[in-house]
Image (spheres, rainbow, N blue to C red):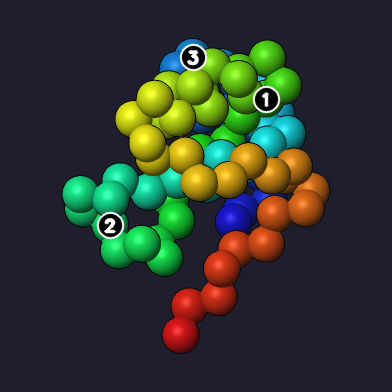
């Protein structure tokens, strides 16, 4: 991660990220793989619903508490 402030993944949003949405697409990712989107408070629910209805959402964690999975 760079020194820049992480921003929300919602289209057009430039607000600082407060949440990490961990997800995977079971059709193309192994079960343990996690992709991430970042979300500000205003977009957390919308992005979570978008991933949730597709069955992709695995976890929502405060950005300050997120720990990237270690790679073997």
Within 10 Å of disc 1 (Cα), the crowding (few <14, some 14-19, many 20+) is many
Q: Quadrant of residue 14?
A: top right
Query: Can the viewer see residue 56 in this picture?
Result: yes
The x, y position of residue 34, in whole percent, is: 44, 56
Q: State the count of labels.
A: 3
Tag of residue 40? 1
In the image, farthest residue toward the bottom = 72
Q: Decide: marks 1, 2 in contact (CB < 8 A)?
A: no
Does 64 sit above or below residue 69? above
Using residue 55 as the reference point, say whether residue 61 is left or right of it: right
The x, y position of residue 9, in whole percent, is: 51, 29
Name the residue that disc number 2 marks. 29
Task: Tell me the residue at 67%/62% (across/down).
Answer: 67
Which badge, 1 or 3, is on the more N-terminal residue? 3
Within 10 Å of disc 2 (Cα), the crowding (few <14, some 14-19, many 20+) is few
In the image, farthest residue toward the left = 27
**Eye-nearest disc, 3 or 2:** 2
The x, y position of residue 26, in whole percent, is: 28, 50
Give the camera-side residue of 33 and 11: 33
**Viewport quadrant of the N terminus:** bottom right
Does 68 sit above or below residue 6? below
Give the camera-side residue of 58 and 5: 58
Give the camera-side residue of 5 and 35: 35
Tag of residue 12? 3
Tag of residue 68? none
């Amino acid at each position: 991660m760079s020194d820049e402030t992480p921003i929300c993944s919602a289209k057009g949003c430039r607000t600082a990220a407060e949440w990490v949405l961990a997800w995977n697409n079971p059709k193309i990712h192994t079960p343990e793989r996690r992709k991430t989107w970042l979300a500000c408070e205003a977009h957390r629910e919308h992005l979570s619903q978008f991933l949730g209805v597709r069955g992709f959402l695995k976890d929502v964690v405060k950005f300050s508490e997120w720990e990237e999975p270690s790679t073997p």
